[in-house]
Image: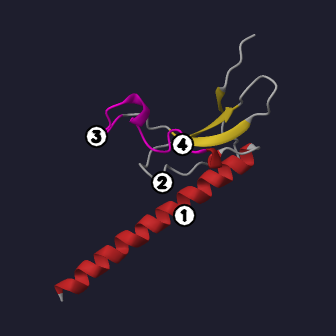
Amino acid sequence: MSHTEFKELAIPHESHLELCPVCGSAAELWQHSESMESSTRKFVRCTNYDGFGPQYREAYEGCLLFMPTSEFYKATIHEAVNYWNEYALALTAQRNGRINDEIAGAKDSDI
């Protein structure tokens, strides 16, 4: 029997996933294991693997959160979903705050 390192999981009915805070695409839940004997780690990732901008090699195509860093990998589905959602909400709020600051600064400079 072969080992599957990555496997997509269904999102539990009581859970929801925030949109990707980088590109706005949908997110999906996955699990990963290093070997048949190792425990699985759950993570949420962006679904955007479409190349954009000055990306010339396959490793650089798609959203930066298509393959998130190891910090996103958690022991349980609940932890992985919570981490993704907290990260997405925090990054979105930070970006929106900076945009609003820039708009306010531009209006102030017009006075």
In reply to whether residue 79 is colored magenta, the answer given is no
Q: Is residue 24 left or right of residue 109?
A: right
For mark 2, does the 10 Å Cα neighbourhood hold few (<14), some (14 to 19), or many (20 or more) residues?
A: many
The quarter of the picture where residue 12 lies is top right
Marks 3/4 in contact by CB < 8 Å: the verdict is no
The foreground one among 91 and 58 is 58
Image spot of residue 18 (x, y percent): 55, 52
First in sequence: mark 2 vs mark 4: 2
Q: Is residue 17 left or right of residue 56?
A: right
Q: CA distance from mark 3 to mark 4?
A: 23 Å
Which residue in the structure is indicated by mark 3?
54
Marks 1/3 in contact by CB < 8 Å: the verdict is no
Range drawn in magenta: 51-69
How is the structure coloured here? Answer: secondary structure
> Is the N terminus in the top left, top right, bottom left or bottom right quadrant?
top right
Which residue in the structure is indicated by mark 4?
27
Q: CA distance from mark 1 to mark 3?
A: 27 Å
- Single out the mark in the foreground, 3 or 2: 3
Q: Secondary structure at mark 1?
A: helix
Can residue 45 be spotted in the picture?
Answer: yes
